[in-house]
Amino acid sequence: MTALFKAILATIFFGVTSFSALAQTTVTFTDRTQDAKGVALGVFEGGELGSLGTRLDRETDGALSHAISAAEFDGSSMKTLLIPAPEGVGARQILLVGLGKQSGGLEDLTYQNMGGDAAQKAIAAFGNDFSFAIDLTGPALAQFGFGAKLGSYYFDKYYTDTDRQKSVETLTIASTDYREARTMFREELDPVANAIWFTRDVSNEPANVIYPQSFVDRWTGHFDGLDNITIKVIDEEEMLEKGMGAIYGVGRGSKRPPRMMIVEYMGGRDGDAPVVIAGKGITFDTGGISLKNPPNMWNMKFDMSGAASAMGTIYALAGRGAKVNAVGIAALAENMPGGNAQRPGDVVTSLSGKTIQIRSTDAEGRLVLADGLYYGDTTYNPAALINLATLTGSARRALGSDYGALFSRHDDLADTLQELGEKTGDPLWRLPLNDKHFAAIKNNVADVMNSGPTAPGASAGAAFLGTFVRETTPWAHFDIAGIAYSDTASPTKASPGSRGFGVRLLNAYIKEHHETD
């Protein structure tokens, strides 16, 4: 069967068949501004110009500094202003970008936000024909470039109208002292930006493109060529052999069977316990027999965001050659109603041997993670076990789109993650998890039930997951239902859709607390 004929058949039965990822923006550092339609010029607080800006000002006989002064642009951090370019600049317009005090001292996240916001404003003003003139140096310039790359992400691959397409191939950042920043960006930051890019890309795809097997295929392609990577995939037959009744039960109603993808990155010392990152991967959630209301069901394509972030985290570590052992687990299923779908009231047996009564088939994420977490905990004896899941509406209602909900039995781990969340732009807020929540999920037919307790839903969901993790294992659960995706823009996320939440945070956590010298 030819590839073309396969594509035709796939189109007939499944619709869109494009499995290609979006081309990533390349960030290039140089010491000279480029001839372009527009220039994004960094201006320090008080209207002061750096070396490049001073050079441009000389070429315009002082007209540039006069224009900045006339516009009353004070250079405060996160401020931008579009002005006509004086003759001699070599561009039609200049986007003034506030860099704050010339002495620096701003947080990494501020420079990231500054870069992302400037990239979005420049793309809006100049399209793909512009360059940056940013007289930052060292880590500050590298973080600016990191943010600019994140901010330039637009999921526009399905637009047929080229006027709506905003993706840019290259961002050129000029600075007189750029070499240290270029090295840091290449070695430390660009791999993380690529990981977030892939995470967003996979999460934003429609469910007729990303389903359990195509998720595996897409990420396998991304990991190709990276060192110290081993990929294992458990299919539905092996799930039944191993007794993974929880994840299999969720996926059995779909023609696209469930998968568990395990990616091992062993960049650390032999024998060191790995950090395990597990993610809920419901590639589409109808609710199953407990059918959801139709109006907002379309965005249930994002219900695999936790699994995408788990894979993205491992990609970030492997991409920068982190000296650590880490494992990513994507628990993948499509939750569909059908003649073979599980029903409310059914009892399934999980990999752990614990039995679960299904109270609602729409509480499916905790089921796939029950097997994923138990597998990760008992197979790898991890140094830490962290999962991400768009798990409950309760977390979204409690915290809105400002925070991911954090649950843990381990105070030190929770405190560390919450602190790093603020620093990295992936904020978390800790919610309670106690004995009452574990008691609330006990069932009079099976060991536990997956829904229907009197306890708060987010905490009960966390308790359900914790039931399948040993108490001695340092474990944290991120309920990212309110923050995994957003229709509003932010400095480092331009277009509606996935935020790639958790990758920056987990990369920083592993770097600071688990990597060896």
Image (cartoon, helix red, strand yellow):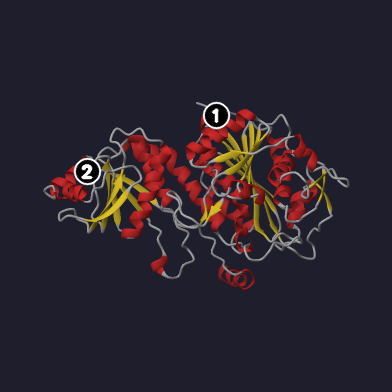
- Confirm or deny contact between disc 1 and disc 2 (CB under 8 A): no
Q: For this view, does 477 lie left or right of residue 445?
A: left
Q: In which quarter of the view is residue 37 placed?
A: bottom left
Determine the secondary structure under disc 1.
helix
Q: Nearer the viewer, residue 484 or 223?
A: 484
Q: Is residue 357 visible?
A: yes
Q: Which residue lies under the disc numbered 1? A: 513
Quadrant assignment, res 381? top right
Q: Is residue 9 left or right of residue 370?
A: left
Q: Residue at x 76, y 56 (%)?
A: 361
Q: Residue 154: x and y, percent?
A: 45, 57
Q: Quadrant of the N terminus?
A: bottom right
Mark 2, Cα crowd under 10 Å, few <14 / some 14-19 / many 20+, is many
Residue under label 2: 52
Residue 300, quarter of picture: bottom right
> Can you give x and y, in whole percent of width and height, for residue 302 in the image?
60, 56
Q: Residue furthest right?
A: 445
Compared to residue 99, the image places residue 474 above or below, namely above
Mark pair 1, 2: CA separation: 39 Å
Q: Residue 87 in the image: x percent, y percent? A: 15, 56
